[in-house]
Image: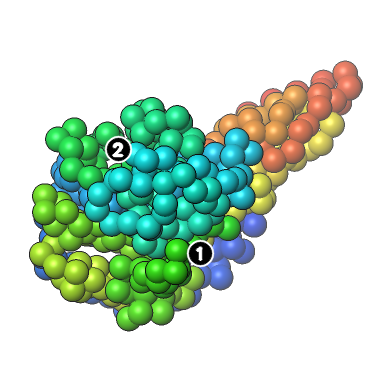
Amino acid sequence: MLTRKSNLSTPILSILTLLLMLSSFTVSSQPNLIPAPPQVAASSYILMDAASGKVIVESNSDEQLPPASLTKMMTAYIVEYEAERGNISLSDSVLISVNAWKTGGSKMFIKEGTQVALEDLLRGIIIQSGNDASVAVAEHIAGSESAFADIMNQHAKLLGMQNSHFENATGLPHENHFASARDLAKLAKAIITEFPDQYSIYSEKYFTYNDIRQPNRNRLLWRDKSVDGLKTGHTDAAGYCLVSSAVRDGMRLISVVMGTKSEEARARETQKLLNYGFRYYESLPLYSSGVKLIDSQVWGGQLDKTDLGVASDVTLTIPKGQKEALVVSVDVDSVIKAPLNIGDVLGRVKVSYEGEILADQPLIALQQVEEAGFFKRIWDLIKLFFVQLFS
């Protein structure tokens, strides 16, 4: 049975709902036996649970490294961000400049002076890793690639990418252009969760433009049916890099490897990380936002009780078979008086595993409770006096 710890400040608090929810967890007597993470031949890497943000494995994950074409994840993210807000449309016709057409490196093979649909350019960025398409999009959105780079850095700051700085939309080498594995995992998580309608592009294996059919360079799309994105990158300075995501049994993992020695190596090392994470860990959706977790007495209100819950979903990443080892601690204000507004913080719920706190969330009021009339308030004060006296 799941171990429970209730630290309740008032005898009035009802935890029936919490107990019923926790009783559904599977009982297991198996000990927690997890082998050491695999040895990964990369300069930097990280494995993250997309739902919880929990890092399962990492090495040098905050090191600032050249990201090569992994940069294009941010370029594509900004396209999706601007389209979501109606500032641009994926049906826009983008005029291709000489500057975009002449950009070296990997290409979508767009032609100078032509009009190309923004949606096609987005596919050219994601699937074909087109530097020409990236520059065309940057100019369309910001007027110039340098102005677009400024937007990229603003988004990096908003996403908490503390070890990243962008100088261009392509990932072509520049001494002040860098990113970390952790930051790229955060960016991948944002792409997946914020723009799910566009995310399917990352799983497309081929894209044909100008009668030229090019494959997606992510080899895992062919080898592992659970993989559905995201992006490859390579320069001499960066080595071979890969950001991948996969879903198995309802759990989504994000893997980043940077600085491997070949296309085959980046696929192989990524597969090691994904297999390890899926084999030994699981995602546990624990609490849903806005759903009653417990209720508590309200004094002097038109309602005698209020429902309490969490403001945002709580998902944990734990070793497989260890749900019964979780410890739940609930702490609610000893006296709750009306009036109450939805969202008022009235306590906290904490969940820990083997001494490590995995979740620490405020308990908020899910109902508005207006102040009662004069006589009801007086009567509640009298009852509260005796409750506190005998407790």
Please tell me whether mark 2 sits on a helix, a strand or a loop: loop
> Is residue 70 depicted above or below 305 in this figure?
below
Please tell me whether mark 1 sits on a helix, a strand or a loop: helix
Q: Is residue 218 visible?
A: yes
x then y, percent, for residue 51: 45, 56
Question: Marks 1/2: CA distance?
Answer: 25 Å
Look at mark 2 in the image and give the residue it sits on: 168
Most foreground residue, 202 or 14: 202
Would residue 132 appear left or right of 345 to someone viewing this image? left
x then y, percent, for residue 87: 60, 35
x then y, percent, for residue 250: 49, 71
Q: How many callouts does the rendering have?
A: 2
The quadrant of the image that shows the C terminus is top right
Q: Amino acid at mark 2?
A: Asn
Residue lying furthest front: 113
Residue contact between numbered discs 1 and 2, judged by CB atoms under 8 Å: no
Q: Residue at x 31, y 68 (%)?
A: 218
x then y, percent, for residue 208: 45, 68
Q: Earlier in the sequence, mark 1 or mark 2?
A: 2
Q: Quadrant of residue 65?
A: top left
Q: Is residue 8 visible?
A: no
Would residue 44 appear left or right of 25 to someone viewing this image? left
Most foreground residue, 173 or 59: 173
Q: Residue at x 45, y 31 (%)?
A: 142
Q: Quadrant of residue 163?
A: top left
Per the rendering, the mark at residue 342 is none
Look at mark 1 in the image and give the residue it sits on: 200
